[in-house]
Structures are given as structure tokens and as C-alpha cells.
Image (tube, helix red, strand yellow):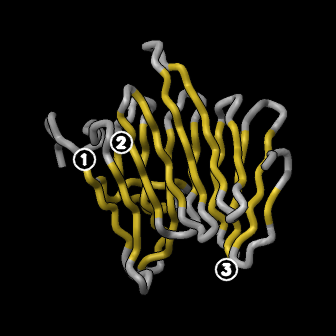
Amino acid sequence: ASVGGGGNCTTETSCTKAREYEDGKVKHIITTDDDTNTTSESDVSGSVVTIFDDGSVETNATVLGSDGKQSEVSVKGNSNGSAEHRLKYNNKTTNAKVTISGAYTKIAHDGNVSTTIDTIMNNEKVRAVVTTNNKGYSHTRFERWDNEAKKWKTILPTIKENTLFEPGNNVLIRDEEDKSDMYIDINATVSQEIVF
């Protein structure tokens, strides 16, 4: 399927739309039957968006790093509102998946990718965050919206800010069936020090 405002709103559970902007950036949105939007934006010029017959959508981008090696980034939104991002660099693939509808994923111009999912817990706005740099290293954390400062603040990093999960890691952000808790599960090979 094409971009440029095109979309697929024929499934019973979702509406998928994609758009390419004049500056080469792209955006895709899946709206589920409960009016939740799962969104992806790419600042990488030349990104390609594909809308599939099942209502899922995928954005692909390739970035050349300062070391001369390519990073291949793929962001997929599924018709049920779940999302995932994958980054392949130097023959290793790093994955992050969110099973909760409503994720927002951003591919930066340098190939770094970040996925967030917001929720309300104990009357506070909180979110889980996974960031993957253009070489496949990931960092995860929970943040809370600070109403006074008008910005997100880290409340629970899963590891120290200067420590990263190595390329090839797999992250899963999920919630309980009753939506009472949100979790970040990480599966990673560890060959260097990780500080929690």
C-alpha cells in the first residue's frame, strides 16, 4: 500500500493510516476499536511505510552510522494496537515489543529509536520507556509525569543510566490483564558489567 494519507479502515477492529511529509519524514497510526492510537514517526528521510491487508503497518529506515556501517530499523504496529521495534546492526538484531495498545515510537534522524507507553496508575500518569541506539544497545526505565515541572521524570530505571543492554537484547513491555501493573521484561546476553 502507499503512503501520503492512504489508509486501511476496513477491518472491524482498527483503522490504519500513514502519511509522508514534504521533508521525507513519515508517520503511521493505528486506531483500535477502543479509540486508542498506536503511533510511529520516523525522522529518517527515505523511510518506507507499508500497510498490510490485515491492518498492520510497518515503517522501515536505513541509517549510515559515523563508523560507515548501516543500521536497519523497523517499526511495526499491529491491528490490535500492539507495537514492536527492531534494529539490526552488525549482524545482531535487537527487539522491543509492547503488548499494550497505545505505544508511541520515534525513529530519530540518527537511527536511535524510542518506544513509550503511557498509563494511569494510582492516579498518576506513568510510562514505560525503551530506547535503542543505532548500534543496538538498549536502556529501559519507568517515568512519571511531573505536573509542576511539566515534564517526564525517571522514577525507576531498570539499570543505571550509563549502563546499556548489549545488542541482540529483547525487551517486552506488558501489563496485567486487569491493567493494575506494567512490567518491563528483558532478555539479554551479558558479557560486560551491568549496574542496577
Give residue 80's position: percent from left, percent from top: 59, 71
The residue under label 3 is 34
Is residue 194 something that shows in the picture?
A: yes
Q: CA distance from mark 3 to mark 2?
A: 31 Å
Q: Residue at x 38, y 79 (%)?
A: 176
What is the number of the mark on residue 188?
A: 1
Q: CA distance from mark 3 to mark 1?
A: 34 Å
Q: CA distance from mark 1 to mark 2?
A: 10 Å
The residue under label 2 is 138
Q: Residue at x 34, y 50 (%)?
A: 170
Q: Secondary structure at mark 1?
A: loop
How packed mark 1 is, by other alpha carbons closer than 10 Å (few <14, some 14-19, many 20 or more), is: some
Closer to the observer: label 1 or label 2? 1
Q: Quadrant of residue 103?
A: bottom right
Disc 2 marks a residue whose amino acid type is Ser
Dot 1 and dot 2 residues touching (CB under 8 Å): yes
Q: Position of 156 compared to 29: left or right?
A: left
Disc 1 marks a residue whose amino acid type is Ala
